[in-house]
Image (cartoon, rainbow, N blue to C red):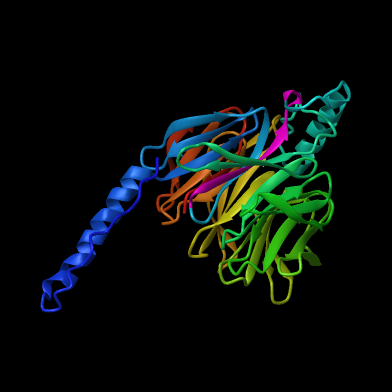
Amino acid sequence: MSSSLILAACGTDQSNTAAPENKEPQQEQAAQEEKVTTGNYYFTANEGGSINKIDAATNEVVETITVDGAVHNVQVSPDGKIVGATLVPGMGHGEEGNDESAEHNDEHAEAADDHGDSGADAGHSEGMNGLALFYDAQTNALIKEVQVGNHPAHIVFTSNGQYALVTNNEDNNVSVIDINTFTVTNTVETGKGPHGFRISADDKFAYIANMGEDTVSVINLESFTEEKKIQVGPTPVTTGVTSDGKTLVTTLNSENNLAIVDLSTDQVTKVEVGVGPAQVYIQADNKFAFVANQGTAESPSTSITKVDLDSKTAVATIETGKGAHGVVVSPDNKYVYVTNMFENTVSVIDNEQNKVIQTIDVGEIPNGISIMP
């Protein structure tokens, strides 16, 4: 439960020179007390039908939110107050479920092995639009569920907190949700099979990895149109963009490479990573990008690759659990968190030592992961 921060008012006696000197420590102490009260967490999206809330101080699961369907991705809003998630609903969510869904899910599972997706959608209804779910990050209460497109993949907030974007993998478009009203205000066409993406720090562009082709769609967030496509290589799964907006990265699942794109020229440099790369995450100072190497369910990879973005070289391979998929770095760059899809765990990595220091049991088939800012 979040608490209010109340600071003591300063005295009006201008001759009291000690008051300004004492104010800063009091504010610092109050801020520390609120941080302890509210807590700092990271969240996993579990395709088995849940979201785990994990205490970042203890690495213990403190809450499990159960849902009807497969939770594919999860993101915390920039102010840390809202958790957004994408849901492929189960048949219990509506009446459209029928026998055709089994055939659909079998086909999706086959495609997933080729494209780095889990294929863990058995029992979910064909033809049902997906949902974006919004929760209070502290109380875990559901704020709103918003209908989006077919098979929603990733969700990302703009840095100003005004919008959340959701990629609809089977509709080849992106839903734009106004966070003030929790309504879809725009739908933007993309390439084939839009999946993971990031938004530039200035909120001008979203970079959408199109899994069904070899491109990244550049979405202009002022006009809400696809401005262009960048050719990157086969089966891009997710993207990342540096805070200065100069460099784009995207995982190439079919090539076992990370594509590094100079956004001033769209020139692509490729760095070899592990087998079946899925998500990528750039740490806050833009020094390293971390690539989760998933492999397949039949032959899972068990590592992440640490890539130096200045030298464009892989500088470390860190062993994780089976099927490393989602990855995020703590805001202070000290820890890297990785979901291991095929053993239902999260690996906590010491970024300086380049090794796993703790393994946490989470829900079934953990996919996306996000941490409070």
**Residue in the image at 15% along x and 70% along y:** 19
Q: Which of 41 and 131 is in front in this view?
A: 131
Q: Can residue 346 be seen in this view?
A: yes
Q: Position of residue 317 (x, y in %)?
A: 54, 48
**Up-down: is 14 above or below 103?**
below
277 versus 309 height, above or below: above
Q: What residue is at 57 percent from the left and 62 percent from the top?
A: 159
Any magenta on residue 83? yes
| 134 with respect to 205 (left or right) | left
Q: Quadrant of residue 146?
A: top right
Please identify the dominant SS of the magenta region: strand
> Which residue shows up at 56% across the image and 63% down it?
160
Question: Residue pushed farthest top?
Answer: 99
Up-down relation of residue 298 to residue 173 (above or below): above
Residue drawn at x 49%, y 38% as measured from the top left: 347
Q: Is residue 120 left or right of residue 203?
A: right
* Quarter location, residue 38: top left
Q: Is residue 196 magenta?
A: no
Near-viewer residue (137 or 305): 137
- Asked whether residue 319 is in view, the answer is no
- The N terminus lies in quadrant: top left
Q: Position of residue 104 (x, y in %)?
A: 85, 30
Q: Residue furthest bottom?
A: 15
Instruction: Answer above or below: position of 60 versus 5.
Output: above
Quarter of the image for residue 189 reads: bottom right
Residue 319 x, y percent position in the rendering: 52, 41
Q: Residue furthest toward the front?
A: 12
Q: Which range of residues does the magenta coloring cover?
A: 80-92
How many labels were placed on the picture? 0
